[in-house]
Image (cartoon, rainbow, N blue to C red):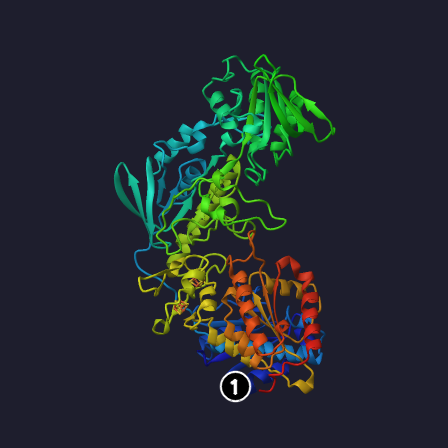
Amino acid sequence: MSDKIGVYICSGCGLGDALDIQGLAHVATSEYSVPVCRQNPVLCSKEGVDSIRQDIADGAVDAVVIAACSPRVMTDVFSFPEDQVLERVNLREQVAWSHAPQDEDTLMMAEDHLRMGIVRARESTPPDPFTVEDLSKTILVVGGGLAGMTAAREAARAGYEVVLVEKEEQLGGYAKQVFKLPPHLPPYESPHPFDLQQQIETLSTMENLKIYTGAQVSQVTGAPCMFDVHIMHGGNEVQERAGAIVLTSGSVPYAAEKLSHLGFGGHADVITAPQLEEMFRTDAVKRPSSEAPVQSVAFILCAGSRDPEHLPYCSAACCVEALKQARYFKEAHPESVVYIFYRDIRAHGTYELLYKQLQKDGAFFVRGTVTGIEDDGSGQLILSADDVLTGSPIMTEPVDLVVLSTGMVPTTAFGKAFMAQSPQEGEEAPIPVDTIRVSNILNLQYRQGPELPTLKYGFPDSHFICFPYESRRTGIFPAGTVRAPMDYAAAMTDATGAALKAIQCVEMIPEGKALHPRSGDLSYPEFFMQRCTQCKRCTEECPFGAINEDEKANPLPNPTRCRRCGVCMGACPERIISFKNYSVGMIGNVIKSMHVPDEYEEKPRILVLACENDAYPALDMAGIRKLKYNAWLRTISMRCLGSINLIWIADALSKGIDGILLLGCRHGDDYQCHFIKGSELADIRMSKIQETLNRLVLESERVRVEQVSIADYTQLPRILDAFADRLQELGPNPYKGF
Ligand code: SF4
Ligand code: SF4
């Protein structure tokens, strides 16, 4: 609780023209008796910031309230020692720039926002970061294929201790079976030789890299920077302490036995792309049926991929792999006949040049679906297909070999993850259960289970736009084909990215700082255990598995696993979870600080609880574009909609606030919610408040949840105005004045 609050009000950026700066200063000094209140024509100027620093140095203030621009900008300018509370009141983007200047409603909005900021500052204390001794900065890489070797090498080159665990006796993973890589150097027309041995030797000379081959992780306990990793190696169990984990366990080829409709198993000369690669690698390219040379070949792309009966997704690498293998034939024997049956050639970037080279080579590209493969009677195979481009059925000349470009299944895919899933209308079908192999790679000793939760199709990816390499277990970063289907080059880039994420993790956590998306946040949830009823809601709802339980169901928080979302705070019915600078009581008092005019003034009040990740920035974007919306709104920034405690809703309604709008991220399988299921949880919890509202004979429409992304800012004014209009139709909240 801070009592020496300094309020600094800016009149630059149009604030002075749009608002009553003197009136705002009067609110601060008369209603809150703040000891310091200053106005400045350009608060972000050196002179403006120096005046704040001087007040701090003089001991005149211990909490700084900046009433100026959005907290999302000028963060480097308005940066003060960590023992200071800092609160930013967004008068620019969300008041002055988005509402009519000097209008009575605009001025009231600015005053309320200042009140709310002062109360928020008053109720905060500077976070006391969680730090302990003996934290590890070692990076554990699980999986020694191309991605794993890359991650290990890059982390070791950056100076970190690295432990690499590979289940096979030799490093390399799938790369051990690879003859050449797709072109990655100009002129991008020919496959490149690949020296795996040289890469392995490079790793073996790195002093800060310890390699276990023929080894498996049998158990991981602990938390980021305190992971105790048990490794079974040579019949013994060894233990390593790690700060972060990069999971590069890769993928396995889709089981070709399930592709009998494409001739696999029925004709010896129908093989898979990995089998053909092995033939080239061992210089043994011949027809399996007769050992005769291969003079003609047909590749079938998307064999089992983008197919609701098999893998519904695109396996991303098989087009380029087929082009590469087709080039093997053309380079060895230009007269070879090559057919490529495709749906779309997904050869992006410089791979386009490989595709063009094959066109020049005279490969036959057929855009169509293969409908049959028949033996022509001489042992050769004739393919029939529907040609999409010409609209006519076609048949090939007899070919010696058919190659199925099979897709990839991540090693994290769990059968059980799909059994409960049934496709919603318009959704892609889930992978049939029997195509998924059960894995058990990390054996996490977490209350929430031993493996990484997976997203769609068994990939343990996190949101693909906002936070690649993140998983739902803090400090564990999947990379390469276990994260998403990708080719060799992408897997190596991916591994480098994940290694960097692991480095961020081991550097930030020892300082008590949160990882993405609240990067650098020093606060963490504290539990007032005397009042805990062991209801398990916090342990069950934490999206990151940060809370274990003892045998009596008491929560056992792991602060370094915590991402500071506050979902546990929103979940706890006893309201005993709080942060130093974010708590149920604090936000409750912020809500109470709003002035609610009585019903005769006909000035409804709407509380907007806006998620800081997308909704709040979208409101800023609307302001930057000078889009106008209703001035009855009072916005409070939330860490996540999942942190909303129902008591706030009840308090707001009993105070006479006319409506409450929750603005959060989109949820669902391709989730955008930065805390995975926070906005979804808010939706579920709000369905409960709707029942309460119905019982109170308050219209359920007074509380609304909207999902918005940052790109929806142009639609926000319409959403906000429509809600305000509806509330006006409903009339004032009957609890006003009570
Ligand atoms: S719910 Fe969020 S704040 Fe609470 S323990 Fe889990 S990660 Fe941390
Ligand atoms: S939600 Fe609250 S009451 Fe329930 S177990 Fe967690 S801390 Fe205890």
Q: Residue at x 49, y 72 (%)?
A: 53
Q: Residue at x 67, y 64 (%)?
A: 716
Q: Residue at x 60, y 32 (%)?
A: 351
Q: Position of residue 590 (x, y in %)?
A: 53, 77
Q: In the rendered view of the protein, which quadrant contains the N terminus?
A: bottom left
**Given the image, on which type of amino acid does mark 1 rest?**
Ser
In depth, the one of 584 and 159 nearer the eye is 584
Numbered disc 1: secondary structure? loop
In depth, the one of 511 and 247 nearer the eye is 247
Q: In the rendered view of the protein, which quadrant contains the C terminus?
A: bottom right
Label 1 sits on residue: 33
Left or right relative to 101: residue 207: left
- Residue 120 versus residue 385 in the image, above or below: below
In depth, the one of 294 and 62 nearer the eye is 294
Rendering quadrant holding ligand 1: bottom left
- Crowd around label 1: few <14 · some 14–19 · many ≥20 (10 Å): some
Q: Residue at x 37, y 71 (%)?
A: 532
- Residue 724 versus residue 555 in the image, above or below: below
